[in-house]
Amino acid sequence: MLKTKLNNLLLEYTKEKITPQKDEWSFVSDKYEELLSLLENKNCFQSGSCARFTSIKPINDLDVVWIISDEIKKAINSDTLDLQNVLEDLAKKIEEEYKKIGVKTIIKPQTHSVGIYFSDNESEFSIDIVPAKNTGQKNEFGDYILEVPEILFYSKKNRTKIYKSKKKVDWRKSDPKGYKEEIKKLHEKNDNLRKVIRFLKKWRWNCKKNYPNFPIKSFHLELIVKDIFETNNNITFLEAIEEFHKDIMEYFKAPYFLDRADDNVYVDDYVKDINIFDKNEIHELSKLFLNRLSSLEKIDNNNIDSDIELLLSARDDEEKFIHDEEFSYTVAINEDINFQINGKVSLGKRTKKDTISNYPLRQNNCTVKIGKSIEFYISEDVNMNNCDYYWKVKNRGENNFQDGIRVPRGEITLNQTYQNPEQTAYNGVHFVECFVINNGKCIAYDRVYVNIQKN
């Protein structure tokens, strides 16, 4: 398949399958205008991916920045700006106003925002109102730079964790309108920009769905794509997604993107805290993507949609996941459960005489030589009744071949790993996962990496 043809097919797929359609954008716009009509203080604006038009379908949330008035700032401590009472009052007012117009909502005042949910299912569409202070400074586009709670920079899932922990959240400078303007102007030069972001966000979404610890943040992905387009204004859609995956690890060596609002802060500072194993996850999934992309150039395009879905799937052939139809378990992790995988490492294939050189896997920093065996188990302090335990083993690395065929594995089995004990046969960093299932939900999960090295 010629690259130009593939480029066009990928673009068409992005337009039809990933990009929100007019009715979705209209729905978000209507919900935003409805909210504004309920607020006496209309000093608000849309933020996040909706504002930058980089959302993928279905759109499930909208960030709204609410610039607090001088009167409110005077009424509270100007240093700590503890807004809890103010936000509780705002939540009460919003709830009353929605009732007046007959719209059913669930309003949740948090320590640093107000969540508006239009369904009992929090995974469906919601609005998060985040307060902001006006710093008085302006960016090069004439928009004010703000101070917002750090909560704005976290994902929806991580915000929930922070709310539950009642962790103190600091304020930091932010320039959401500046980022929006940058994306807009760059997109005007090359209208592939937003399409590439959406396509790669779909890949990232699948990565997060399949591998809960996948570390790339959505906004960081946008900045990487923006950087690629700033370097080459004429880049094609296909060239951009290839370059993203070929160069991705360069962006995870160290923080790279300075914050528009504060050049003492890196937006991607979190990369310093990503362990080598999770970085390896990015590398492996990008390699898998590029291998499949290369094969797309050589095949018939009669089933191109299914081929592109496989490209974006972030899963090896035959690999299983706990959310697959075969299992259909909802992931609802209970963060309070202390759950950990370990393993007993022995000399090799176990025999009755093999009673020496056994040690816990984590005791040796999860590094094991080729030719040993490992029996995996869960931490002794975990004792949950009426639960099922599912195990998964995944091989990573270049040398996972048997008779010339790559054997990444990825099966899911009940009660123990498929091969018990597991043999350390392939060089590389692999992993084992365990899922605790209760009443149809995955309530606890852990992964342990196994770094297998040659003797």
Image (spheres, helix red, strand yellow):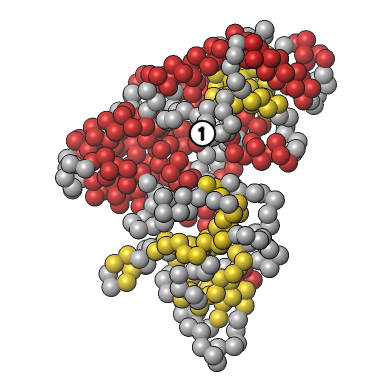
Q: Quadrant of the N terminus?
A: top left
151 on left or right of 300? right
Residue under the image location 53 percent in, 67 percent down? 415
Looking at the image, residue 44 lies above or below residue 260 = above
Q: Position of residue 353 (x, y in %)?
A: 55, 92
Looking at the image, residue 192 lies above or below residue 423 = above
Residue under the image location 41 percent in, 50 percent down? 325
**Residue identifier under label 1:** 219
Q: Residues within 10 Å of mark 1 (few under 14, many from 20)?
A: some
Q: Position of residue 255 (x, y in %)?
A: 55, 41
Residue 123 appears in the rendering: yes
Q: Amino acid at mark 1?
A: Phe
Pick the front one: 49 or 145: 49
Residue 451 appears in the rendering: no
Residue under the image location 56 percent in, 34 percent down? 121
96 on left or right of 27? right
Q: Secondary structure at mark 1?
A: helix
